[in-house]
Image (spheres, grey):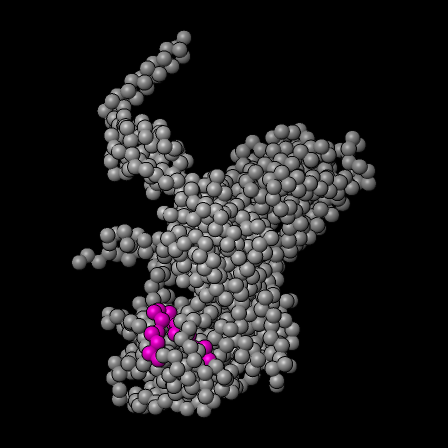
Amino acid sequence: MSENTIRLPDTSKLVISSSPHLHEDDSVRRIMFMVILALLPACIAGAWFFGPRALWVLLVCVASCVACEILCTRLMGREVHVSDGSAALTGLLLGMNLPVTTPTWICVIGSAIAIVLGKMIYGGLGYNPFNPALVGRVALLLAFPTVMTTWIAPMTRRLEWAGVNSVTQATPLGVSELTAGTLPFSYWDLFWGRTGGCIGETCVPALLLGGIFLIALNIIRWHVPVFYLATVAIITGVTHWLAPAQCAPPLYHLLSGGLMLGAFFMATDMVTTPLSRKGAVVFAVGCGVLTSVIRIWGSYPEGVSFSILIMNSLTPLIDRWTAGKPFGTPRRAPREVKP
Amino acid sequence: MTTVILLTVTGLVSGLAIGIVVKFYGTTPNPLEEKLLELVPGANCGGCGFAGCEGYAKAMAEGSAKPGACPLMNDAVVQEICALLGVESEARKPMVAIVCCSGDDDHAQRMAFYNGVNDCQNAMLVAGGGKGCVYGCLGLGSCARACPYGAIEIRPNHIAVVHPELCVGCGKCVLACPRRLIKLTPKSAPVHVFCSSPERGALKRKFCSAACIGCRKCVKEAGEDQVSMNGALAAINYDNPPDAGVAAACPTGALRTTAVMESTRG
Amino acid sequence: MIKQLHFYGGIHPVEDKVAQSVPIVEPPILETYMVPLQQHIGAPAKAVVAKGDQVKRGQLLGEAQGFVSAPVHAPTSGVIREVTTCLGPSGAQVPALLLASDGEDAPADPMPAIDWHQASPGDLRQRISAAGIVGKGGAAFPTVVKLSPPPNKKIDTLILNGVECEPCLTADHRLMLERAADIVTGAQITARILGAKKIIIGIENNKPDAIEVMRQAGADYGIEVCSLRVRYPQGAEKQLIYAVTGRKVPSGGLPADIGCLVQNVGTAAAIADAVCLGKPLYERVTTVTGTPLVSPGNWRFRVGTTYSEAIKLAGGVKEDPIKIISGGPMMGMAVYSLDIPIIKSTSGILLLSKDELTQFAVRPCIRCGRCNDSCPMGMMPGILSVQIENQRYELAEKWHVMDCIECGCCAYTCPASRPLVQHLRRAKAEVQAARRAAKAKAEK
């Protein structure tokens, strides 16, 4: 072949970068999108049980979170990266943790607290030590306790906008505190979500579906929900065996409250939980212990939010403990050979 | 009433305890060091060669450091310290840093697009940064980040420029530049050679239109004792610098008075 | 013995071994060769010829300087046109000799053939050193240094690296298929030098034909073949030793500390050539591949062949590439000039098209942990990268950054597309500089 027929690349249009020059087909946006997708069954279940206002609450939370993030990033003088989906996910999780009767303005305040105080003041995505959705929820719980602990019975007035005409009903955990000995809800009621509660936390099969979907796609670690739920089951099992009249059975605990939502979607939040698998297990066990302790002996009926936030504060320490030694480091330091 | 008595007694006992501890275990402050600590600027830039101003004050009090090493202090303060220490004051030449390169994107060729960490030292790990001239400024900001006084500007066309009015001559940027482009020069010098490449003129010209091509016009204009040639690169004699007029002789603009390159030249 | 073995972590990128069925081609003699005097780790060779000298193929052009160095030999016969410098793949200028070939490819007198069954290890080492043999797996460490472990470290197992875990590269695969006997001879020579009793060849099981060929070639000499599960970086020294022998190289240590030595199959073949034929090292098999190429394949290039000539031999390009890589896609170096010459350690020239380009982004670490899950050394690249961004190099040292083998698994899996390997390389350079400074201060 002659010189003229062979084209050589135009080297001034080349890109140089460090190795590796290959990359997996994944991104932060895809991960966030998949988690949102996994949460949709539970959102739909919430709308089914509590009426269309549930969707309004979720929408307000998502929109407020996104708006707050855009405002904050502009004020901080940085590039707006809200399209990576993390603000939308925070909004969705926050909304799912609110009762359907939460007034719109409280939803907005909760979203603002979640994004501004839960994420942006630390520097944005990746730098926050606490789960932003839980920060928002706990702030609302402490600031508006009555609003945040008023739930309506499901399946009542579903086609109406939830409000004055709905019947209030305590949640399964709230009830078990009051009537010792008998369980007011059957396990099937708890499983399907025919109880009072926050929008996204009641329907167990919807949450399980989403959770298993994420584990199968390798987006969340299976270690966290398994060890979290197992720890709660073991501790509540032991307490129920020791004091069956005062303490509800483990299956009751597993199916009620925000445990399923927390175990699959809140305790698996990547930014605020330890990096390694070992660390995730320690984190999950810690959450399980704290949740059980708060539920059984604490004065709050629900312990998931607080336990996850407390374990979030221990995440850097857990990281350091479970950093592990690199391949080839001896288990014990070799004995010094005295000359 | 018991509360009042209790708190008063606690306060008295604590105060007594602190007093006793300070008396037996407290360090006696060196009055000279205290005075010096007041006089040092407190910017902790490291230009004196010590980790911070406190370290420098201690060293001066001990006698292991000379006053005048701090680039921030003005002459009056140095005189005061010399009087305190009882030493002779030496003449100081205020220095400023200059980035010896004119190769911004408008003048110098980039051989490839660099994708990676926005830091010059990191870019050197990737095929040397991808600039045609291997001696030129990469413009990614290692020096600007190292400067404690914010005196270095990275312009949008990827060149580092030192603002002499903000620079104190601490020398942190000199160490930060992976290509050793930054030099400390006397503040009084009117012209500088903003090029560092020792290559042949024709080769330099291929990659940068603002390079020093070694044409020797500056040497002819000002004389060998003021501007000399170091191979194909002009070098100013800072002990006897030429005046600003010699810049007009430079055909590429590498030898000029200001750090910023005029866009009409070269 | 066929075993299927594994190690912790790692990734499984698309293999893309397009050129694996293309036999090695001997290219024609070119007009000029730009022969670098630095083709190895260590001090560059010192030129023993000058401008205008006539040289023959295989003649010594530069002698080794010091112990950690290697000589350089002429790839063909001709005249030294210039003593100059050329661009290397790392972006730095290296001293080089421009050789204008006379087209005859006349050989210099070969070194006398050695009967390696009788020769002493010292004589064999000398021959390897004189032939300029360096590790051809990519590291280019002078082989004679590697084969001279301290007397208190006895090597009992020699492991040949036929793994070729990098995607797209097929040079070692073809070499095993076409020169199995020479590889086996080279391995036996190396084992004789070291006094190693056991020789094992590790090959990934995506090369069943190579496994069979090597098994047959080595059967008469008691050489075992270990079939390894396909996982990147199975070919990394520490991971290979662990998979084949179950021994772990100590952190900060060398394979010799646990009685093992790893050698690339190409190096083994070169050793056989040097000892049995008296032939010095001046050529190697390189894979030229990539979607933009017209006809990817494997060639036995002489050192000094420029990348542009290599690409021309591969039929040129049918579309403009966006990236040119020296080596494989996971650990290779991106280059911007095609005037870079092929050297003893260039295992591949890879071209990437625009659709295949992946870019790094300046985004924060979301602490997903995928880097930790895929790191074959069990480190935490995500946390390290945040420390390095904040210039806390002493903290990075405490978190084991010096154990990084720069395999690229972490950056491959990072969803935030962070340039993790670049951060880690910078940290390693800073830590090494700090250690040297501390050592110098202590010695004062």
Is residue B170 toward the left or the right of residue C444 in the image?
A: right
Instruction: Establish if C76 lies above or below A26.
Output: below
Query: Does residue C187 show up?
Result: no
| Residue C110 locus on image (x, y percent) | 34, 89
In magenta segment, residue C34:
yes
**Quadrant housing residue A232:** top right
What count of labels does the image hold?
0
Quarter in which the N terminus of chain A is drawn? bottom right
> At 43% from the left edge and 59% from the top edge, which residue is drawn?
B233
Residue at x 56%, y 63% (from the top left corner): B112
Horizontal and vertical percent for residue C47? 35, 76
User: Who is closer to the viewer here, C431 or A176?
Assistant: C431
Residue C150 appears in the picture as rendered: yes
Q: Residue furthest left?
A: A339
Relative depth, front residue between C315 and A196? C315
What residue is rendered at 74% in x and 48% in y? A44
Residue found at the far right of this picture: A159
Relative horizontal placement of residue C102, taking residue C199 as reference (left or right) = right
**Residue at image point 68% right, 30% down:** A147
Q: Which residues are magenta?
A: C33-49
Question: If the image is split into quadrants, where does the C terminus of chain A sit?
Answer: bottom left
Magenta stretch, overall SS = loop
Above or below, A155 relative to C145? above
Left or right: where A198 falls relative to C189: right
Query: Residue furthest toward the top?
Result: B1
Observer-nearest of C319 and B197: B197
Q: Position of residue A76 (x, y in %)?
A: 60, 40
**Residue B84 in magenta stretch:** no
Looking at the image, residue C246 lies above or below residue B91 = below
Residue C143 pos. (x, y %)? 34, 75
Query: Looking at the image, which is closer to me, A295 or A137?
Result: A137
